[in-house]
Amino acid sequence: MKTGLSRSLLTAVVGGALVAGGAVYTAPALAAGPLSTTVLTVDESESPSADPTDASPSPSESSSESPSAEPSESSQSPSPEPSVSAPSTTPSASPSSSPPPAPDKAKPTGGAFKLSLGSLWIGQKTVFSQTAADYADNETPDAQIVRKVFWGDGTSTVLGATATSFTKQYTKNGTFKVYETLTDKAGNTLTTPAKTVTVAIPGTYKLSKTSAYQGTNFAVNLTSVPAGTTKATVFWGDGTYTDRVNPKKGAINGYILYRNGVVNPKNKISGKFTVQIEFRNKNGLSSRRSVGTINILKDASVPKLTVTKPSNPTKASSWRTIKGTVSDKGSGTPYVYATVIRVTTGGTTYCLTPAKKWKKWTTDQQYLDYCGLKGIRLKPSKGKWTLKVPAGIGKGYVIVDSWTWDWADNYGSKVRQQKITKS
């Protein structure tokens, strides 16, 4: 029985391995069926250079095989010998190619800038100025250089590509070093020399007291004012303020009673308020600074008035000097206002004007216009007040009309009437 392989075959299949002249490499899997485990020996008398394809069986041999025989060589596609390329000795680059460019290690140049103010008050502003002519780079266009300004107070600003200025407002006092970094596309950074900015708190001041009744005066006492100050403004905390032009050392007085200064009983306010101050000079306004907190005490008490009855009340001369008292449990009463009405036996009425002149009147409106709205202003002393009355009171009636307001705008009044029977 034929073996199915020619005697000129110099190779053998051993478990899927091809042995040729003693060299072994692994062949790919056969196209049909599993690999045979049949071991074929090599006839070493044959030339090792014979072509393995010469071992293809003849058609007659192939057809004489039994169904259990190995698949014919013609039904398989033997793997070709692997091709091995010899290493090339030719350089990949042409001898005429340019060398790669050297990396950019040069920093930007220049970086000059200006500050409009080197000495200013807290809240005022300085302007950083720089043009494209002030910096450059050998590789990076100006617009692509990253410019970052460090203000020295912990903040920084990246300037826009075409920005030529930036306004900085300092919110705290101190001495600050301002500098800039310029970074090109390669990451090279130039740090400019620093410029010094000094920021000061203008003036020294304090509150005259820490609590006060509604409507009573308290003050911000200026203990020092910076040279060149053109105005100081005190904000009282109730929506109102007081300006002092060309201020000097001393008191700026104020009070708190109505919200936003609108006189209306519904607008009365009390409690704690923060008083602030700001200054102005040729460089502009400083920021507002707290002077302190004032506690405004509510005053709901009504002042009390009396008109003292003379020792001989029916005698006209007893009313040439009118006396009385005033008291208040809260903010106190700065003034007492009064007028005197005399009525003759014939029924003619006169009132005492603020100028202490007798004025005849016939209607209520005339009385108010002549005497009753303003009255004669009297300054109490230790709770007592006195009014000197010119001659004119005679037989008939005398009426003393007195009134007052305390600092919290609480109103009190007192009227005394007496019949005069003696001149």
Image (cartoon, helix red, strand yellow):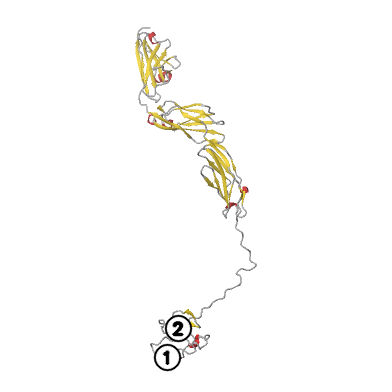
Nearest the eye: 236 or 138: 138
- x%, y% of residue 336? 40, 19
Q: Residue under label 2, please give it.
A: 13
Residue 309, x across and y down, in percent = 35, 12
Which of these two is toward me, 16 or 130?
16
Label 2 amino acid? Val
Tell me if residue 389 comes above or below residue 144 in the rendering. Answer: above
The answer to whether residue 144 is above or below residue 121 is below
Q: Name, please, the residue furthest toward the top.
A: 423
Circle 1 sits on which residue? 63
Callout 2: 10 Å neighbours few (<14), some, many (20+)? some
> Splitting the image into 4 quarters, where does residue 35 fall?
bottom left
**Residue 65 at x, y = what percent?**
41, 90
Labels 1 and 2 touching (C-beta < 8 A): no
Q: Earlier in the sequence, mark 1 or mark 2?
A: 2
Tell me which amino acid carries mark 1: Ser
In the foreground, 419 or 365: 419
Of residues 307 and 161, the one nearer the viewer is 161
Q: Mark 2: which secondary structure?
A: strand
406 to 118, vertically: above or below: above
Label 1 sits on a secondary structure element that is helix
Residue 348 seen in this snapshot: no
- Toward the right, the furthest residue is 96
Whole-angstrom CA distance, mark 1 to mark 2, is 21 Å
Q: In which quarter of the image is the N terminus?
A: bottom left
**Which quarter of the image is occupied by the C terminus?**
top left
- Horizontal side of residue 60 vs 420, given as left or right: right
Residue 37, percent across and down?
41, 83
